[in-house]
Image (spheres, rainbow, N blue to C red):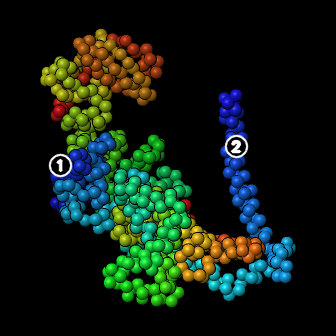
Amino acid sequence: MLRRAANFLFRHPRWALGLLLGPPLLWLGVVYLGSLAALLVQSFFHVDEFTGQVVRSFSFATYAQLFTPANLDIFKRTTLMAAAVTIAAALLAFPLAYYMARYARGRVRSLLYLGVILPLWSSYIVRVYSWKLILAKEGIISWFFSAAGLSRVLDAVLGIPGIGGPSLSFSSLGRFLVFLYIWLPYMILPIQAALERVPKSLLEASADLGAPPGKTFRKVTLPLALPGVIAGSIFTFSLTLGDFIIPGTIGDSSLFIGQAVLRHQGTAGNVPLAAAMTVVPMLIMAAYLAWARRLGAFDAL
Amino acid sequence: MSAPAVRFVEVSRHFGEVRAVDGVSLEIADGEFFAMLGPSGSGKTTCLRMLAGFEQPTAGRVELHGRDVTDLPPYERDVNTVFQDYALFPHLSVADNVAYGLTIKKVAKPEIRRRVDEALELVCLPDYGARKPAQLSGGQRQRVALARALINRPRVLLLDEPLGALDLKLRQQMQTELKAIQRQVGITFLFVTHDQEEALAMSDRLAVFNQGRIEQVGTPAEVYERPRTVFVAGFVGTTNLLLGDLAQRLTGTPGPAAIRPERIRLLACDTTAGAGEASATGSIREAVYLGMHTRYTVDLDEGGELAVVAQNLDADAADAACAQGRRVRLAWEPSAIRALVG
């Protein structure tokens, strides 16, 4: 019976392909794209101001609400943070990924992999809360600065408007540090994978043709690693844009997009506005990818 | 006399316990087409890499045109390499790949464009500049790699098994072309290969490598006709290696010695050998028809066996098929037997 099924599939590869691709396509098509479509449709509904009921008719009324100064402020704050986190993550991840791909062998390599992946095994919320303790006024970082006699430096940094706050755990700087910590593995792994695919002979060829190491890095290594950097940045950028746990736990009371969405669909009961707000990070990501494409990030693919 | 283009002086390269290259000394003249021949792991590629600057010798000295370059990094040496895997930059177009060396040297744009066109013309790919390496066939990539190296007008061009990935027909065509290009540009070509036929066909001189050492250096004819060692006799072409009893009978010494299969004449057993020729009788154990020639394995009556190759001048294939078991006389000039060093 099993054998006959196998023979049938061997002779009719289209059936085999259909059986293999059916479930994932169903998932992608119905569950994923379907919910996305539902989201888009809802974003064009609006809430009646008097009754508080959702009016199921097409209008741009909800999208108009996005342009209030408070909402624009949220978008700006979130996008800037996402950009800052992405750039810092790329700068931090690259050397480590480079070392992992080019030099680390055997045990060291396994340990580095484990070190990068291990944090992903533990609960994300637990890690965020532990950072709240680390960054608190009584936390280890404050303690370190005072023990080193550098409390003034920390106070000066916390005094910078827009970045600082009463303590690290109530500052944008604190938010930034936690975002950076939480998303860093998502940047390291794709860059490492991209660098691993660059054959050593390409670097030798570049040197052979007269390029000193710095030039080889700029003209060969970096362009070939760029798809990995972009892949990593898609993670760090979009995860920051949508996150509501970190800005809700660390930092002052200013909102991020994710928190605003949570409030509108939850306590405020304004699902259309929540949906419209969700469209914003999608548009930002689309613009970002278009820009990356023009930069030639996908040429080497 | 001017300094040789390339000079290895007692060069060794050890990887831990492994002696990849072990005391190699070699001189290559300016303008020579030189082949380094040997099986994989014999040290020929490591020698090439030390010349390019990718590897540091553990001991010894590497010179280019009389200048000690042992401690120079690759980007400060006046050599260019055609890599075994071609190592074309996948994110650059063919033209940008070829222009790479000149761009690094900050040559003026118009001149780069002119020289790129020239280089692509030289390798017969004039209209391929806009393509990406992924859009080329293996043979075309090989030509681009060649153009990319030659455009810098290096004084020595290094080629690391450049034809290894090509099929037979293309390989033979590229052999002829490489040779023609070398004559045209007049620079020293140093060519690494494990294919003895390729080395014989292309080089002015060759060095035979074995286990990190050079066994013999000479012209193709010298190395083929007068192999110095057992290894060279066996590696370059096919040969009858004469050892012990067989050597004693045929040469009067315990050997080792060798005689090429094509230097032995195959006669009917009732004919006599020519004047001054040595001979032995036996019977054919195996005959393999190879088109242009037939290869026989003959069991000698007094023990031992010899391989004989006879050209198929008038015989047809059927002859070879029914040759098995036939009694024959083998005859050869005594001078065809070469004494070898262990």
Query: Which residue is painted at 73% across and 64% down in the image?
Result: A36
Q: Which residue is mark 2?
A: A19
In the picture, the quarter occupied by the N terminus of chain B is bottom left
Instruction: Confirm or deny contact between disc 1 and disc 2 (CB under 8 A).
Output: no
In the rendered view, would you say B99 is above or below B234? below
**Quadrant of the image containing the C terminus of chain B:** top left
Residue B56 drawn at (x, y percent): 24, 58
Residue B163 appears in the rendering: yes
Q: Amino acid at mark 1?
A: Gly
Res B182 seen here: no
Given the current orientation, which residue lies at the most extreme top position?
B270
Label 2, residues with CA under 10 Å away: few <14, some 14-19, many ≥20:
few
Quick one: label 1, few (<14), some, or many (20+) residues within 10 Å? some
Q: Which residue is mark 1?
A: B23
Query: Regarding mark 1 in the picture, which secondary structure is present there?
Result: strand
The structure residue drawn at horizontal position 39% and vertical position 71%, both measured from the top left corner, is A215
Q: Residue at x 35, y 82 (%)?
A: A146
Please tell me if label 1 and label 2 are on a single chain: no
Amino acid on which the number 2 mark rests in the picture: Leu
Q: Is residue A84 left or right of residue B111?
A: right
